[in-house]
Amino acid sequence: GENVEQHPSTLSVQEGDSAVIKCTYSDSASNYFPWYKQELGKRPQLIIDIRSNVGEKKDQRIAVTLNKTAKHFSLHITETQPEDSAVYFCAASKGHTGNQFYFGTGTSLTVIP
Amino acid sequence: DTGVSQDPRHKITKRGQNVTFRCDPISEHNRLYWYRQTLGQGPEFLTYFQNEAQLEKSRLLSDRFSAERPKGSFSTLEIQRTEQGDSAMYLCASSLEDNGYTFGSGTRLTVV
């Protein structure tokens, strides 16, 4: 089965700085990679996703990059704000062949005002 | 609210009792998923339905767990003879084909 590893487990940045969270996956058949943000006591919310036919995707201050050869993908948040503080989860799936998501263990991001 | 709804939000039960949770997905979503999340961990897959068919079950889903999705609409997850190790957040999610999930707010189960 798929194994998704996520680093770091905790990350503190100053407001305005950038934050980078990295994930690796093991199954080369995985082709869909979403990122979820989960605030304390709330549901995970999809913030950005990328498919394996694309190397990079950007949405305002959030970007995701994918390196299929190395089997890793990263979340980049620029100009961080205190409201970005949350736990971020990466996931990998094979898309239409089952769509079961394999989640990483999460990164707790704290943005210091 | 047109999101994914889960009921109840919290459930405290005594060890050995049966519990049932309900999930109402986004109406046009044909796929429904159940995940379990423990503190400090990412969600772990339990099972998924496409319409009314249960297509995949995790080995985490022991014979004490059963899920149904009659008529391809809402779903129920039942845990029989609950154990303390079943204490977790049970998350339901739905999607339309291969798109990203929309999660519900979850049911937090505490087994005492």
Image (tube, coloured by chain):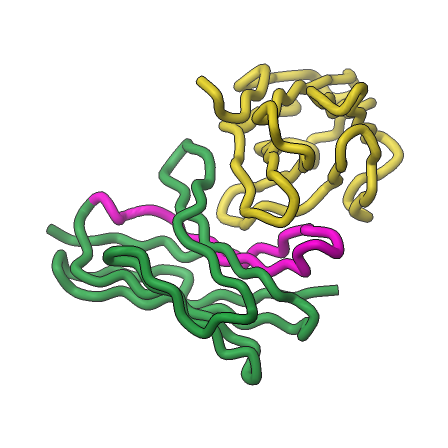
Horizontal and vertical percent position of residue B91? 59, 33
Residue at x 55% of width, y 42% of height = B101
Residue A79 can be seen, yes or no: yes
Residue A99 counted in the magenta span: yes
Query: Could you tell me which quadrant the C terminus of chain B lies in?
Result: top right
Residue at x 65% of width, y 73% of height = A26
- Occupied quadrant, residue B97: top right
Figure check: B24 above or below B42: above
- Occupied quadrant, residue B32: top right
* Magenta span: A83-105
Left or right, residue B44 beside residue A33 = right
In the rendered image, what is the letter of the chain coloured yellow? Answer: B
Left or right, residue A85 beside residue A27 = left
Horizontal and vertical percent position of residue B20? 72, 17
Figure check: B61 above or below A50: above
Figure check: B3 above or below B58: above
Left or right, residue A31 beside residue A43 = right
Residue B108 can be seen, yes or no: no
Foreground residue among A16 and B74: B74
Residue at x 61% of width, y 17% of height = B12
Figure check: B33 above or below A99: above
Chain A display color: green
Foreground residue among A20 and A61: A61
Horizontal and vertical percent position of residue A10? 36, 60
Report the residue that reaches farthest toward the bottom.
A69
Residue at x 69% of width, y 20% of height = B74
Report the residue that reaches farthest toward the right.
B63
Left or right, residue B9 beside residue A36 = right
Horizontal and vertical percent position of residue B98? 63, 49
Query: Could you tell me which quadrant the N terminus of chain B lies in?
Result: top left
Q: How many marks?
A: 0
